C-alpha cells in the first residue's frame, strides 16, 4: 500500500471561518518506510496524520492510495482502500470503551464481519504483538490497567485490523522510559514485516533518530525539512529555527565542534559518539 499526498492543503472550518493549517504538502509513504513527522506543538502533525489516514479530506490537492485518487473514509463507498490504513490517535487509551480487553480489541474485526475463530485469532495475535498475554489480560476490564497497558491495548485494537500502513500519533507520550522503549520496539517489528509501512508522529527527536528512515519537519503547516535522520539532525541551527532541538548526541557533538574539538557531527547512536570522541582523543580526527 502506497499513500501519496499531492499538493495537499487543509483548513479547519470554525463557525464559518477557515483556519488554514497545512499548505502544499507533498509526501509519499511506501512499504518499508518508517516516516517520522516532527514539528513543534501546533505545527499540524496530527492534522497531517489524519489526512494520511483518510479521516480528513484535503481542502485542496489530492490523496492517492496505490495510485488511485481517494476521498476520505466517510465519503468512499463499498470496500475502501482505507481499510488497509490504521490510525492510533494521540492518547488512544481515552477511546477504550468495552467491558473486557478482548471485546475492545475485537471491535474492529467484528465490524469487518469476520468469523468468531478468526476474530479470536486476530485479537490474540494483536495482544501478543504488543507484549500482552491474552490469557492473562483478555477478560479484564481495560479501565483497571496501567496507563502503559491501556496504551498497548489501544494499539492492539488497530493492529487487529491488520493494516498495511500504521499511523501512530505520539504513541509514547506520557509513558515511562521502559514503556516508551517497548512501544518503539513493537513499531519497529511492525514496519519490518513485508509490505508494511509506519508513520510515527513524535516531537521526541531521540526516538525519531533511532527508528525512522525518513523524517519530515513541519513548521507552521509546511514541510520545512525532509531527509534521513542523519541529514536532519546535523542541521542544529535550522532545527532551532523551527522550534525543535536536535537529539542529545548530535547536540553534544555540535557543541564539542563549537568549542573547537574536531569531532564528526554525523552521530546518531552512542557507539558512533564514542568512536568519534575516541578518534579525536587519539588525534585521528584531523580530517574534520
Ligand atoms: N478539530 C480542530 N478544529 C479546529 N482547529 C483545530 C482542530 N484540530 C487542530 N486545530 C488547529 O490546527 C492547528 C494544528 O493542530 P494539530 O493538532 O494538527 O497540531 P500538532 O502539531 O499535532 O500539535 P501537538 O504537538 O500539540 O499535538 C492548531 O492551530 C490547532 O489549534
Ligand atoms: Mg498533535
Image (cartoon, helix red, strand yellow):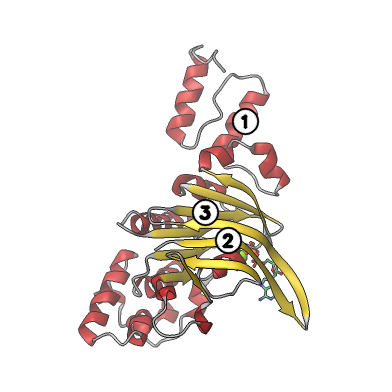
Figure check: 75 above or below 170? below
- Distance (Cα) linking label 2 and label 3: 18 Å
**Image position of 206 (left or right of 102):** right
Image coords of residue 123 (percent x, y): 29, 76
Give me the residue at 62% from left, 26% from top: 256
Q: Is residue 31 visible?
A: yes
Look at discs 1 and 3 and give the one toward the viewer: 3
Q: Which mark is residue 254?
A: 1
Judged from the image, the quadrant occupied by ligand 2 is bottom right
Pointer 2 local density, CA inside 10 Å: few below 14, some 14–19, many at least 20? some
Figure check: 62 above or below 106? above
Image coords of residue 30 (percent x, y): 42, 56
Give me the residue at 48% from left, 64% from top: 168
Q: Which residue is mark 2?
A: 6
Q: Which mark is residue 228?
A: none
- Distance (Cα) linking label 1 and label 3: 23 Å
Q: Which residue is mark 3?
A: 36
Q: Secondary structure at mark 3?
A: strand
Front in this rendered view, residue 61 or 207 = 61
Figure check: 213 above or below 277? below
Pointer 3 local density, CA inside 10 Å: few below 14, some 14–19, many at least 20? many
Q: Secondary structure at mark 1?
A: helix
Q: Earlier in the sequence, mark 2 or mark 1?
A: 2
Give me the residue at 65% from left, 19% from top: 260
**Image position of 126 (left or right of 219):** left
Q: Is mark 3 within 8 Å of ligand 1?
A: no
Q: Check if mark 2's residue and mark 3's residue have beta carbons within 8 Å.
A: no
Amino acid at each position: 500500500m502506497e499513500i501519496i499526498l499531492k499538493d495537499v492543503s487543509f483548513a479547519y472550518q470554525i463557525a464559518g471561518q477557515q483556519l488554514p493549517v497545512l499548505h502544499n504538502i507533498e509526501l509519499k509513504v511506501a512499504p518499508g518506510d518508517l516516516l517520522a513527522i516532527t514539528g513543534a506543538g501546533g505545527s499540524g502533525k496530527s492534522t497531517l496524520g489524519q489526512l494520511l489516514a483518510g479521516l480528513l479530506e484535503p481542502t485542496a490537492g489530492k490523496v492517492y492510495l496505490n495510485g488511485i485518487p481517494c476521498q476520505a473514509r466517510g465519503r468512499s463507498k463499498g470496500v475502501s482502500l482505507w481499510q488497509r490504513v490504521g490510525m492510533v490517535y494521540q492518547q488512544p487509551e481515552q477511546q477504550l470503551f468495552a467491558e473486557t480487553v478482548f471485546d475492545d480489541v475485537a471491535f474492529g474485526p467484528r465490524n469487518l464481519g469476520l468469523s468468531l475463530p478468526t476474530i479470536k485469532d486476530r485479537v490474540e495475535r494483536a495482544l501478543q504483538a504488543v507484549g500482552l498475554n491474552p490469557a492473562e489480560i483478555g477478560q479484564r476490564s481495560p479501565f483497571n490497567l496501567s496507563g502503559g497497558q491501556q496504551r498497548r491495548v489501544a494499539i492492539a485494537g488497530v493492529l487487529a485490523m491488520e493494516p498495511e500502513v500504521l499511523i501512530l500519533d505520539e504513541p509514547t507520550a506520557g509513558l515511562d522510559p521502559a514503556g516508551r522503549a517497548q512501544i518503539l520496539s513493537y513499531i519497529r517489528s511492525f514496519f519490518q514485516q513485508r509490505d508494511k509501512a509506519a508513520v510515527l508522529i513524535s516531537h521526541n527527536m531521540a526516538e525519531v533518530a533511532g527508528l525512522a528512515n525518513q523524517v519530515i519537519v513541519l513548521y507552521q503547516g509546511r514541510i520545512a525539512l525532509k531527509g534521513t535522520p542523519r541529514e536532519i539532525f546535523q542541521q542544529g541551527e535550522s532545527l532551532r529555527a523551527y522550534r525543535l532541538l536536535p537529539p542529545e548526541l548530535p547536540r553534544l557533538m555540535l557543541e564539542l565542534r563549537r568549542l573547537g574539538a574536531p569531532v564528526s557531527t554525523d552521530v546518531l547512536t552512542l557507539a558512533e559518539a564514542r568512536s568519534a570522541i575516541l578518534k579525536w582523543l587519539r588525534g585521528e580526527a584531523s580530517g574534520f
